Amino acid sequence: MDKLVDPQLILFDVVATEKADIVRALASRFLEKGRIDSIDGYVDAVLERENSSSTAVGFSVATPHAKTDHALAATIGFARLAHTVHWDEEEDVNLVFLIAVPMKDAGDRHLKILATLFRKLVDDEFRNTISKAKYPNEIVGLIEDIT
Amino acid sequence: MKIVAVTACPSGVAHTYMSAEALQKAAARKGIELKVETQGSIGVENRITETDVAEADAVILTNDMPINDEARFAGKPLLRVGVSVAIKKADQIMESLETQLSKS
């Protein structure tokens, strides 16, 4: 399990009204794929991080993440929402990258994953594809080089 | 034309790297040589050396956070921009630098 992403961790048309629902929907896939050991434990860690400062970064994108013992393998999931949600007071979001990194991984691995993702986000073609992709493999193709 | 830039943002991750990449792409589109140092949570990456500064025609610094070791750019034409401006208007930044530098 060395890849961070696989097609089953990509969700389209997710119906949600708040960020916890979205995180939970992706976390249940993470659990099914053996990438986390507890939905509640992992989701709590993500929301706790989110409460310290919002992970909405502009372009209708949010990048919730947690480095936690509940993560078993470094993982990126993606959800595109059927409708935007109010992610924080300033930003509405409909594109969500959820990241899990085990506590035992190198101290800044989650930051390096995020940094690579943020660099990709300023590319018009990247944003166009994540907004319009029809197949999970299109998303996988965009982010599978992240290590 | 060679430009050096340093980006940093309060959260230390998102806008540091997004603005760095946006500037890099805009420079590449105009054929401008640009080196961008990021001062983020990971630490300093792609550090700008004394030689880089000596060769640079201009310096871009983001102004959302104090930039570490700003003194090394003393005496160089300096442009300060917000990270969100750098992300959204990188092409205009490169254009205006080009115009200003061609006049001087």
Image (spheres, coloured by chain):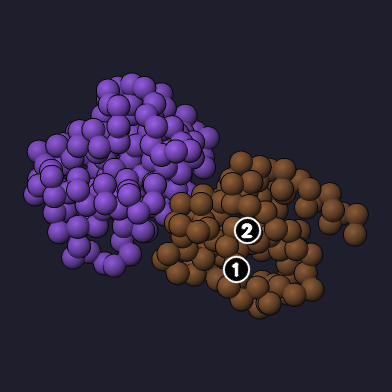
Chain colours: A purple, B brown
Query: Is there any visible trace of residue A2 in the rendered image?
Result: no
Vertical arrangement, residue A135 with respect to residue B41, above or below: above
Vertical arrangement, residue B51 with respect to residue A97, above or below: below
Q: Is residue B44 left or right of residue A75?
A: right
Q: Is residue A16 left or right of residue B41?
A: left
Q: Residue at x 37, y 29 (%)?
A: A85
Quarter occupied by residue A87: top left
Q: Amino acid at mark 1?
A: Ile
Classify the position of the C terminus of chain B by image quarter.
bottom right
Q: Amino acid at mark 2?
A: Thr
Name the residue beneath numbered marker 1: B67
Name the residue beneath numbered marker 2: B62
Quarter occupied by residue A33: top left
Residues beneath discs 2 and 1 located on the same chain:
yes
Give how far across and how far down residue B12 sits, in percent: 46, 60
Q: Nearer the viewer, residue A3 or A63?
A: A63
Give how far across and how far down residue B55 sits, in percent: 73, 70
